[in-house]
Amino acid sequence: MSSPNVTISGLARRLVRDGLIDEDFARQAILNAQKNGHPLPFELIGKVSAKAICQAASDEFGTPVFDLNAIPQANIPNKLVDPKLVSKHNALPLFKRGNRLFVAVVDPTNLHALDEIKFNTGLTTEAILVEADKLLPRIDAYLNAAEESLGDALGGLDEEGLEGLDIEAVEDSKAKADDSSDVDEAPIVRFVNKVLLDAIKMGASDIHFEPYEKSYRVRFRIDGILQEMARPPANLAIRLAARLKVMSQMDISERRVPQDGRIKMKISKTRAIDFRVNSLPTLFGEKIVLRILDPSSAKLGIDALGYEDFQKKMYLDALAQPQGMILVTGPTGSGKTVSLYTGLNILNTPERNISTAEDPVEINLEGINQVNVNTKVGLTFAEALRSFLRQDPDIVMVGEIRDLETAEIAIKAAQTGHLVLSTLHTNSAPETLTRLLNMGVPTFNVATTVSLIIAQRLARRLCPHCKKEARDIPEEILREEGFFDIGIPREELTLFHPVGCDKCVNGYKGRVGVYEVVRITPEISRIIMEGGNSIQIAEAAKREGFFDLRTAALRKAAIGLTSLEEANRVTKD
């Protein structure tokens, strides 16, 4: 059946005039080429030989024919043009001469293809006419070589452990499908999966995907220190960001504002890891940071956290109280969340009603009612707390006390028969008390409600396989650092240096908590009531026998758990 509305021109007209095809076939071939997005010669193969088609195109457009067999595949520059453009336009870069790139095509009138390749490479493009049946295998070889090259550039992708990996998104935000072609490429998918798996195996807490003008890097935060792990090509920045955003159900078409998402990775039938994902538009692309949330870290047990025996007893005694307030303080990344969740695990029994307000919920705990605060809709810490108090709670956990309103409601809850756990961002236990006073909480409420304060840091733990004893340390150095005031006899002091081996990172493996645990005693209550400052409270705590952070860190170094350098890093001003 003829297609009267199709104009026969160019190559099709030449083939009709030469008697190689009839008009009806020419019209149908033109329609098929438009429908399939192919150059016309690909629709003519089978009816006319590729050589005859190529010769007709040469005669029609005055373009010489080039024999592809004259160039070995190994000589074709497989990194010069984006493989997507090669596949899209069926145009193959052959060789470069100065600022000119010669491109093999079957349709020299496809100026759109030449313009896109010119824009992609910054080179002037010239069409070279070749036979279609020779071009297709060469394009397939080019794409395969590009994929293998991409795999090498991404760090030699190891398939072990990736086959059974199950990754699912758990956020409700809706991802767009417009750029799906950008993120469905196997090397990108495998690389991202491998990075996530490697981070879990290495015990990383965060993963940073960072684009720069001429480079791209992937870093892991291991034991509190960022370390570079990979440098994929800079031109993959958009595709890596898009893949991560698809996995975390972000809007991949939105690149101008920060976004939040979540990924769940099932490692086995019994273990799953959550990733909290945040994107941030930077000067050269989107930086993506993943926080690894391992529920098993909340179930380590209090013995694994590194408390001194008397500190652990004080924490357990405070948790056993029917009311009062326990505050955990320290900078971001100091382990406050794990300390709080460890306490909640101890309290989590069928007889208790436990509710938490967090920003965001980091670890899911069965049996505990967890609420994500959302300031955009008015669900603040204070509003969540008010609601908790109407739901017959026994124990309440507030992710952070940020303002007077939240502090007052938490204090009220602690005074009316509830145990309240929360955090503040302060440097020490005494400063926590003065922070509450500075917020405007009355001195009487602070002195009578707060029962225990835990200030903490995380120090890197020395690798037991390679640590080396530090001998002949001068007495004046030990005295200057404070080792003679930590309650350990000089003859029992044993300091070690990090060395480094194949089982650790720079001599360290894992982390150990350093704690200042202060119970609010009658003397400390009196100082608070009299308006005392943090220095007076710290002196009273020392008289009561409570270790400050510096003493706790030096004790960890004195028994070989960490190094003096690390103790200084986390506690010395």
Image (cartoon, rainbow, N blue to C red):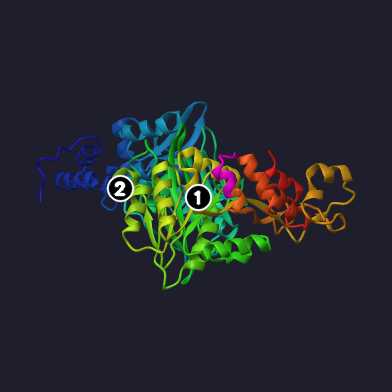
Under circle 2, the secondary element is loop
Disc nearer the start of the sequence (1/2): 2
Label 2 near label 1: C-beta < 8 Å? no
- Residue 193 visible, this angle: yes
- Residue 138 visible, this angle: no
Under circle 1, the secondary element is strand
Q: Does the magenta stretch include residue 528?
A: yes
- Mark linked to residue 176: 2
- Mark linked to residue 423: 1
Q: Label 2: how many residues lie within 10 Å, few (<14), some (14-19) or many (20+)?
A: some
How far across and down, in percent of the image, does residue 220 sit? 57, 49
Q: Quadrant of the C terminus?
A: top right
Give left or right: position of 440 versus 6.
right
Task: Name the residue rendered at 32%, 32% in the picture.
Answer: 111
Q: What residue type is labelled 2?
A: Lys
How far across and down, in percent of the image, does residue 276 sit? 45, 52
Give left or right: position of 383 versus 567.
left
**Gap in Å between the C-alphas at discs 1 and 2?**
37 Å
Q: What stretch is highlighted in magenta?
A: 525-533
Q: What residue type is labelled 1?
A: Thr
Q: Nearer the viewer, mark 1 or mark 2?
A: 1
Task: Name the residue rendered at 79%, 44% in the picture.
Answer: 481
In-front residue for pair 329/447? 447
Q: Quadrant of residue 106?
A: top left
In-front residue for pair 386/335? 386
Q: Does the magenta stretch include residue 453?
A: no
